[in-house]
Amino acid sequence: MRRFGSYLFLRTLYAFIGVMLTLAGIAWVTQALRRFDLVTAKGQAIAVYLGLTLLSMPRVLGVVAPFALVVALVLVLQRLQAESGIVAITAAGVSQRRLALPFITSALVVSAFVTALAFWFNPIASRSVMDMMQTVRADVVANVIQPGRFTQVDTGLTFHIRNRDGDGSLLDLFILDERNPEYSYTYSAKRGRVAEVTGRSMIVMEQGTIERKAKATGANTFVTFGSYAFDLSQLAGKPGAANYGLSERTIGELLGLRKTEDTPEIAPEIMNRLAEPIYPLAQTLAVFLFLGFPTTNRRGQTLPVTMAIIVGSIVRVLGFVVMGISKGAPEISFMAVAAPTLLTIVFAIMIIVGIHPTVSTGFVDNLIDRLRRAIMGRQEAAR
């Protein structure tokens, strides 16, 4: 059994890696398409574009890894059922507890992987993305703004120039700043240049006007200036000096903040990080409950496989729900860890006792028939 257990362990891990890479590839394509404006609209190099999209992958892997494990377990256990392997193993005297060990070991490996992502790699990658985006914005303002085109540097901040002079000056500069919730500002100048003033990046504009418009009333105020400096330092912050959010901090930094600050959002963030490694184990036990017990192939495997996928996925979705609730109510943030732990214990007891949850085809047929009648009744009532 030891050699066969190693075979099941490796087979599950191979299937997990294959499914995870497939799901991660699909997710990477969606991320890459979302940031494609860095190349098309903001003129960034392809290396910057690829760097930003690849840095988003640790967070994506943290989300898809538990679901990839569910699919991998279903593939391996369904194959064993189809080949009557579980029946043969059980007939040889191997208990369900011992049969579950290789799959539990696989879940522990995935949990270690998810732990590394949640505790360190995700926050480090997120802060790297933040630093790179600040550099991108600064580069857009200084070098990438194209004459005759409206370039959106940041949400609510748009630049336009007529042309560039030989010394790099921006001719007929136009800036629309709508980031303030109460006022919008329109800057126009005959000439502007990017310069460092007292250690801060500025656009020094000459001979222009500023229009301030109240968004609520539409009242306008005009100011004419001979020289005016538009501050770019908030866009071009220095890497590492940004005010990182909780999601950009490692678990060690969060624990340090917990000791020095009394912010209510810190406890839910810590609890959610601690809970993430528990879900792969809970999902593994949930899938094993439906596919890890010997059954006859005459009943078919469609229903057990479907239930294993649904229940295994619901376990992780429940974590997202608890996470959202705990962030709104920090006093119950402990539920983020308590919920998956309780599920893991319940599933483990069911396997040890030998409880095999089954859903009969008659129950499913009856449910489908009721749904069909309800839909037909509503259609007739609408007529």
Image (cartoon, rainbow, N blue to C red):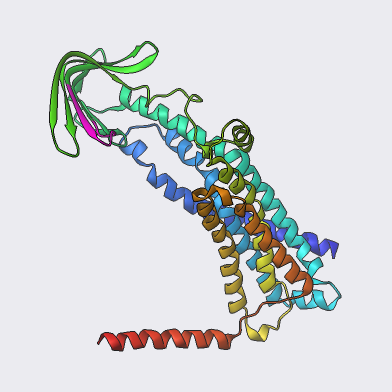
At 64% across and 53% down in the image, what residue appears? 337
**Residue 195 within the magenta-colored segment of the rendering:** no
Along the line of sight, the residue nearer the viewer: 9 or 358: 358
Q: Which span of residues is magenta-colored?
A: 177-188
At 37% across and 42% down in the image, what residue appears? 36
Left or right for 111, reference 316:
right
Q: Position of residue 320 (x, y in %)?
A: 53, 55
User: Do we see residue 271 in this rendering?
Assistant: yes
Q: Position of residue 110 (x, y in %)?
A: 67, 52
Left or right for 314, reference 4:
left
Left or right for 43, reference 263:
left
Q: Position of residue 77 (x, y in %)?
A: 68, 69
User: Do we see residue 79 in this rendering?
Assistant: no
Q: Position of residue 289 (x, y in %)?
A: 69, 71
168 relative to 24, above or below:
above
At 63% across and 36% down in the image, what residue appears? 255
Please state, as top left, top right, bottom left or bottom right, where the C terminus lies in the image.
bottom left
Left or right for 107, reference 68:
right
71 relative to 82, above or below:
above
Q: Quadrant of residue 10?
A: bottom right
Along the line of sight, the residue nearer the viewer: 2 or 239: 239
Please state, as top left, top right, bottom left or bottom right, where the N terminus lies in the image.
bottom right
